[in-house]
Amino acid sequence: MGFPSDVGVIDTMLSVPRGRREDWYEFMKPQLRDQESLEEFEFPAQYMFKEIPHDPQEADDPVGWTLEQMDHHNIAMAMVGTGPEVKDHPDRFIPCGHVDPNRGMDAVRDIVRDYEVFGIKAVGFFPAGCNPQVPINDKRVFPIYAKCVELDIPIFVCTGVPGPRLPLAPQKVELIDEVCWFFPELTFVMRHGAEPWTDLAVKLMLKWPNLYYSTSAFAPKYYPKAIVDYANTRGADKVIYAGYFPMGLTLDRIFSELPTVGFNDDVWPRFLRDNARKVLKLDD
């Protein structure tokens, strides 16, 4: 059968583009030091991509434009930030809050506010992108993990070497082990590859029942072999589709390459839809 055309995809990393692309990453500039990142790149990880999506800032209706792109590629729902589109189109957009643990209890209050106002289904955390950086197992994040457990929502965390030219130490995959041990009820989803520690990521997913992996920021032709092999064996329920549109990958590229990924037939529906529905509790 191969890649199915009749599965309504759930994309766990997509964004509705507003404003100039370079403004999306303004928060990162205080930490960047090289000239290319500060003066030449449209986005900080641009050196890793052969081409990036056309900047759609001229679109009169960015939400409508995004929905058109989703419809064209059979994306039924997409996880985005907490913009007005999540209230205007609750059947298409899944709200996700984003936190900076440096804010202390205010970060916890941010989660509660987003949960009450927008009904967030998840929280996002970028350890290397915080200023100062916050390691995955840092005590500053523990109140956030605890609140996610209390609200019964997952946290999506960037892991592995960051694409932007920032120090990698806060995102070492080994740091996840302590978090899963201390918070066995926490649903933790690895974002952005976990490279070069994908073998360790697989080992930890075997160890911890609530640890998952998403494919965000990777073109399908570059999905790590260890992750594909794991999905085809013991990890069919642990690997979740995520794109990277419009940040660094076009949907045209993603969906033209997906059929070449060697997932087993029974894995595809779970990868594209079912695992996200379970983790995000979309059926509750």
Image (cartoon, rainbow, N blue to C red):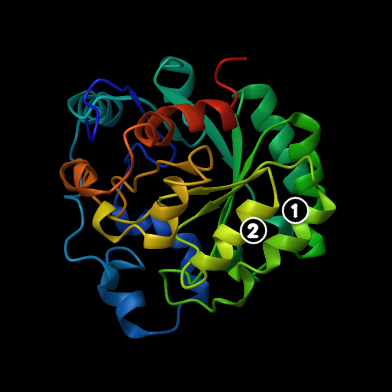
Please name the residue that numbered disc 1 is placed on: 180
Q: CB under 8 Å between callouts 1 and 2?
A: yes
Q: Residue furthest bottom?
A: 34
**Where does residue 9 sit, x and y in percent of width and height?**
34, 28
Which residue is rendered at x = 43% and y = 31% of the image?
A: 270
Give the residue type at disc 1. Answer: Cys
Which residue is rendered at x = 67% and y = 28% of the image?
A: 115
Instruction: Please say if 207 is above or below 128.
Output: above
Which residue is rendered at x = 52% and y = 37% of the image?
A: 237
In the rendered view, does 273 fall on the left or right side of 105?
A: left
Q: Residue furthest front?
A: 233
**Where does residue 119 sit, x and y in percent of width and height?**
62, 23
Instruction: Please say if 233 is above or below 69.
Output: below
**Where does residue 41 sit, x and y in percent of width and height?**
27, 70
When asked about the image quadrant of residue 267, the answer is top left
In the rendered view, does 253 fall on the left or right side of 125?
A: left
Instruction: Please say if 43 is above or below 275.
Output: below
Q: Which mark is residue 204?
A: 2
- Tell me the quarter of the image containing the N terminus: top left
